[in-house]
Amino acid sequence: MCGQLIRGCSPSSDVLMSSLIETIEVDAALSKRLAEMPADSQTLTLSLDAIAEGGSSAGVLQHPSWAYVPHIATPRVTTEGKVDAADLARTIEATGSVDGEGVDADPSRTGNLLIGAGDSSPSALNPPAATSSCEGFLPPRRVAMLSSDPTKADCASMKDVEYRLVGTLGSGGTGIVYQAHQRAIDREVAIKVLRRELATDASSRGRFLAEARVIGALDHPNVIALHDLCIDDEGQLFYSMKRVDGASWDQQIDTLSLEKNLNILLRVADAIRYAHSRGLVHRDLKPENVMLGRFGEVLVADWGLALSKSSLTPTAAVPSTDSHHAIGGTPAYMAPELAAGDLFGITYATDIYLLGAILFRVVAGFPPHHGKSLLACIRAAANNQIEPVPEQLGDTELELIQIALKAMATDPLDRFTSVEELIEAIEGHRSHEASDRLVRRAKRRLAEIGELGAPEEVCQESVPSGLRADRYERFAAVDALLREAIEIWPDNRRAIDTLRSTQLEFARTATAQGDLDLALVLYESAGQTDSEAAARVRKQRDRRERVRESQAKYSTLFTHSPDAGMLIRWSDGVVLEANTACLELLGYAKEEVVGQKMTSLTIWACPEKRETFIEQLAREGQIDNFETQFLHKQTQLEELNCDDKTGQVQIPGVIDVLISSRTVHLGGEEMLLSTVRDISARKTAERDLEYSRRRLRDLQRLAGLGSWSFALQSQAIRWSEEAFRVTGRDVSRGAPDYNDFIASIHPDDREKLQVAVERSLTQGTSYQLKFRYRDDQGKYRKLFTRGNPVFDADDNVIEIYGILQHAAAGGG
């Protein structure tokens, strides 16, 4: 039988539960009735009001979908807290019939199953004074329904009305809740009124009063506040309480996030922890009995089944009639001891079970007990048969399910020892979830690093410089997230394993970047000091140290050289050394250049010239006097405008240089030794001379003088337009070459002109003389010329230039 499957209850519980289930099953009509009712989340209540030995009182088996049936005897309760099975059978038989008398035969409606005592005879509409005399102080208050028709309002009768009922908010098996206006304080409240058919039922009145006084005695922010407990003109019991602008938790639970639902559950648990400190057991915790206000309020309601532990000890015998005790709960959430009907087996652990059942509902999406009918759900609760959880739950949700299952252990001794311990378990899970969130963030960051490409590719031009620059920063951020996750939850294996794999990936990146010491530290942190990868890095580091030692001997002379120079590792382009002259030339500190890759240094004024230099160096292995321009550190790069034809930039802060480079081998590695010579002064002089020449030519043209020039290296002669006019040579023929020019001179004048030109080229002297030149018509013209040499930076003549004019204009 079902009762034999429940453990952990008092010795009488098996008999009681067995009697309840067996009695239902032997009554075919009641079994059929309950089997046709779908499982729901409504409260099941079994009244255990004691009566004098041999006495009896009226009772009723009620569900909100069933009408109230009077004049049924209440089953007797033994001194061990058990219901007499024979009396219970008679009670169920009288009230559970389905012949339609006093019963709503619609099985689709669900609600409370109630066994209580009462008398609803017509003479009992106004309860006797004796009934209310033992109920304690109950101040009278006038209550009236607010009429929508002003013509029907009785102003005289409404003058003393304290509560005006506005409308119905809800109803249950024992009471109706109205929205009302309290005139004295001018506020909206909720009023719960005992059903009129139960007005003379001492047991119902007692439970109603007990519920109100329990709520009123609980001063906690998560317990709905009770304002007033009163009696109206007809003796009807009611109490007013805070009206919550919101809805019950069950109406919102599926729309809220797991985190928000856990926050609500923890506030409910805090209210129950407070109730336990006051010696009270709620017994009917479920989302339907939790109100959520529009402004964040979380209020535990429906304390109608709350029990004081002081009256539930086995030494207290059977609870007195004044206690108005009942066994009840909601089958979908019910603890086994509640389903068993074990009054003395109810402890604080019962509420712990119910909190665990709510946690199960939050995570799984459905209550722990279920059945195709209400009867099947009751059996599942009695046997503590818990529904299987969905397979798609993640690790976080499964951890919460484990907490819920511990709280819902069949044996109360196997549950959490207190609500505080349950709260700590949930809070511990939340810290685990916070740790896991950090791990998930870290993994997303790792994925972003992976999008940068392989470590050896991060400095390639195809990878954005912004992403290349912060690779180390991204690894550091991932490391910080994972260490924080481990600090929150030291046993988080996901965080520990991810940190280890991150350190190994970071070590590989550091190795590719040449940060071998950092890579070895990371291998050590990951516990991979003796790994093959770490051994390779150590060998690479040792080889590098030997290279550095050999480089040190060489760089001593290199560093103090008066010429600017750099020592660059050919394999990766890292600057190993830059001497003082080079640093002063470019305006950088040593740490800004040494250890950096050449591709990351913005010292080239024209990127095209840099590409040409690299291509020529790679092709020939050396390069001499490569002319280009470098940028001083203070130069604003955005102002540069490189001439595509000359590759020259003409702004202040640009340095004209000649680069000579050679590949050398040091310590088994190929190095690039580059010397840089500043030729800015020479280039400035050349530009100034060219400017002067242009000015002179402009002046000569304005003065009507024919100008000419003779370039020594190219043997090219240039004439101005005026020179063609003076000599009588057609412009379309172009300037003559040197031999053509000499051939056009009168034979008697050739030698003296050649001597003057030769002397100017070899000795750098100027000259002036007269000579005769044959024009296109074959006639000789008398001309006068002056010649001046042009020198380079080494005082070598590279050009002769001068003027031509008619001899008469040129003087003697």
Image (spheres, rainbow, N blue to C red):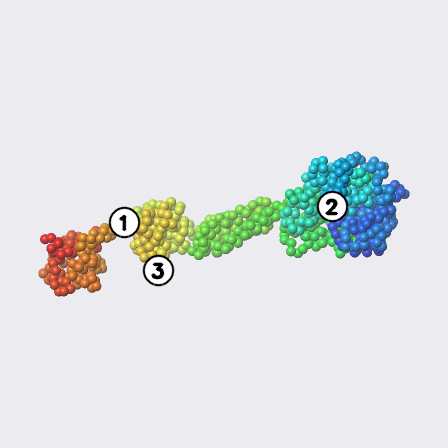
How far is disc 2 from disc 1 in space, using C-alphas? 99 Å
Residue at which label 3 appears: 619
Above or below 112: residue 612 = below
Q: Position of residue 87 (x, y in %)?
A: 87, 48
Q: Position of residue 664 (x, y in %)?
A: 35, 54
Earlier-in-chain disc, 2 versus 1: 2
Other-residue count near label 1 (Cα within 10 Å), few / some / many at <14 / 14–19 / ≥20:
few
* Mark identifier at residue 684: 1
User: What residue do we see at 23% from left, 51% from top?
Assistant: 695
* Mark identifier at residue 168: 2
SS at badge 3: helix
| Occupied quadrant, residue 50 | top right
SS at badge 2: strand
- Mark 3: amino acid: Arg
Other-residue count near label 2 (Cα within 10 Å), few / some / many at <14 / 14–19 / ≥20:
some
Left or right side of 417 for 475: left
Residue at the outermost front position: 151
- Mark 1: amino acid: Thr
- Mark 2: amino acid: Thr
Q: Mark 2 against mark 3, which lies toward the viewer? A: 2
Residue 215 visible here:
no
Residue 367 visible here:
yes
Q: Mark 2 against mark 1, which lies toward the viewer? A: 2
